[in-house]
Amino acid sequence: MKEQKLPHDHGHNNEELIRKHLPGEAEIAGVSEAMKQLGDPSRLRIFWLLCHCEECVLNIAAIVNMTSPAVSHHLRILKSSGLIVSRREGKEMYYRTADTELAQMLHHMIEKLGKITCPEEYI
């Protein structure tokens, strides 16, 4: 399929190069979905917390000052998006950030944009 000529020539000379590298909708869908999941401030705080420690629902709820059911709701959404993982130890479930490039990048982006110092810098 021949590429369509752009309606206006602004003399930038890079439009065709950018067009060739523009991600398709399928390629960018995962990033879009992850960013949607972090659009809620409470969920964002929980995600950031789990970037730094592994915790159970009751402790997460106490740290972020929310009810356990509210925290569980956010954890389900984060887990279904692949941003966090869980493990069972006896009757207790523990949650932490997934060891993925996307989760790590989102963690660093949150800290850069929010000008938040990572607690690990003090250890």
Image (cartoon, helix red, strand yellow):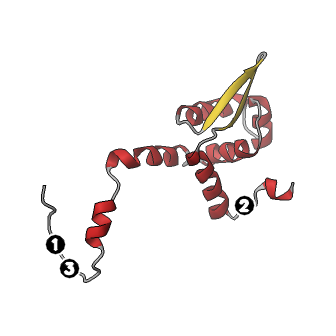
Mark 1 and mark 3 in contact? Answer it, CB < 8 Å.
no
Residue 37, percent from left and from top: 53, 43
Give residue 7's mark.
1
The amino acid marked with disc number 3 is: Asp
Q: Which residue is mark 2?
A: 116
Amino acid type shown at disc 1 = Pro
How crowded pointer 1 is (Cα within 10 Å; few <14, some 14-19, many 20+) is rated as few
**On the rendered structure, is 74 left or right of 95?**
left
Residue drawn at x 51%, y 45% is 34
Q: Nearer the viewer, residue 120 or 65?
A: 120
- Please, is residue 121 above or below residue 66 in the view? below
Q: Which residue is mark 3?
A: 9
Could you tell me which quadrant the N terminus lies in?
Answer: bottom left
The residue type indicated by label 2 comes to Ile
Q: Tell me: 28 left or right of 122.
A: left
Tell me whether circle 1 and circle 2 mark residues in contact (CB < 8 Å). Answer: no
Name the residue furthest top. Answer: 90
Distance between the alpha carbons at the discs numbered 1 and 2: 43 Å
Q: Quadrant of residue 75?
A: top right
Q: Image quadrant for the C terminus?
A: bottom right
Position in image of residue 33 (x %, y %): 46, 43
Q: Secondary structure at mark 3?
A: loop
Helix, strand or loop at label 1? It is loop
Asked whether 103 or 73 is in front, the reply is 103
Q: Is residue 49 left or right of residue 36?
A: right
Q: Residue at x 65, y 63 (%)?
A: 112
Q: CA distance from mark 1 to mark 3?
A: 7 Å
Q: Nearer the viewer, residue 79 or 21?
A: 21
Q: Is residue 73 above or below residue 8?
A: above
